[in-house]
Structure formats: structure tokens, C-alpha cells
Image: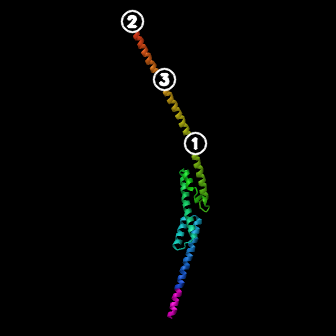
Amino acid sequence: MLLKVIFGSIALLALLTGGYFLVKEQSAERLAATLEHHLEAGEYLAALAAAGTLQEDGKVSPELEEKIARAARLLVAEDAYKKAQTALDEKRFADAGALLRGSEAVTDPAFTYYEEAKKLYEQAEALAAGVAHKTSVVISALEQKAAAEKAKREETEAARQKLESDLRQTEQTVEAKKAEIAAAEGRLEQSRKE
């Protein structure tokens, strides 16, 4: 009888242990399916949470690591996409283009907002190019205006220097004439005295 109880306890323990591992394995399979579902639905943060639970359960594999890396890249792409939308709304076109350039948002068709991100990137690049062209035209016009102002200033300076030179020459001529007049008056005075 005691032997039956011992064997029954061992069998029950084995059954419970097997059941635990079976439930744990089914739970891991459900988590893996949940991870896939979240990745496909574009819920990257939830996918990372499911992957973290799988890692905690000891279900680490190269496939799981790749899914975690992919979910992380797509989460970063989603953040870049949202920041690019904000930058475009704030008319910071170059920033919007830079945020999306080379990002998973525009290179991975599995990204939830892939088409929207591509359109946003193309729009941002086109607007940034337009702003760059407009800026280039304005800079060119300002450079031409500055060159014209410089030439005008140089011409004015040359004219001022010529006027100053003519004025000095006229003053010297006037002084020479005054000296001649003074000498002539002195000779006239002298001739009257004689």
C-alpha cells in the first residue's frame, strides 16, 4: 500500500511537471505568435515587450534576436517618421528629409507607414531643394548688389579724391595769385612813393 502511494505521488509529480512544461511551451508559442502579430500590425513597442517576455522565459534564439532587432529598427523608424512630419509642418524641410534619409521608414516596405514616409521624404526633399534654390538666388542677388555698391563706393571715393586734389590745387593757385597781388601792390606802393 505504501508503495502504491509513493508510486502514485511520483506519477502525480511527473504529470504536474510535464503539464507545467507543456503550459510553459504553449505560452511561449502564444508569445511568439503575439510578437509576430504586433510586428505585422506596426505595434513595435508591444512586439518588443513580447520579445522581452520570451527572453525572460529563456526562449532566446537567433531568430528571436533578429525579430527584436527588426522591431527596434522599425520603432526608431516610426519615431523618425513622426519627427519628420513635425519638422515638415514647421517648414524645416531639410530636417525632415535628413530624418528620413536612409531610415527604415523609407527602405523597409514592412514599415506600417512606408508609403506615407516615402511621400513625406520626397515632398521634404523637393521643398528643401526649392528653399535652397531660392536662397541661392537671394544670395546671388545680394552679392551682385554688394558688388555694385562697392563699385559705386570706389567711384565716389575716386571722385572725392579728385575733388580734394583739385581743391588743393585751386587753393595753391589762389594763394599764389594773392602773393602776386601782394607783390604787385607792394611794387605799386613803391612806385607811388618814388
Query: Does 46 appear above or below 171?
Result: below
Tell me, yes or no, if residue 43 can be seen here.
Answer: no
Which secondary structure lies at badge 3? helix
Question: Foreground residue, 148 or 159?
Answer: 159
For label 2, the residue is: 192
Query: Does 153 appear above or below 66?
Result: above
Region of the chain picked out in magenta, as a range:
1-12
How far is the residue under mark 3 from the one under mark 2? 38 Å
Question: Foreground residue, 64 or 37?
Answer: 64
Q: Earlier in the sequence, mark 2 or mark 1?
A: 1
At horizontal 59% and vertical 47% (from top left) the residue drawn is 130
At horizontal 51% and vertical 29% (from top left) the residue drawn is 158
Q: Is residue 131 magenta?
A: no
The residue mark sitting in front, 3 or 2, is 2
User: Residue most toward the left?
Assistant: 193
User: Residue most toward the top?
Assistant: 194
At horizontal 57% and vertical 58% (from top left) the residue drawn is 103
Indicate left or right for 190 with 103 as reference: left
For label 3, the residue is: 166
Predominant SS along the magenta part: helix
How far is the residue under mark 2 from the one under mark 1? 81 Å
For label 1, the residue is: 137
Which secondary structure lies at badge 1? helix
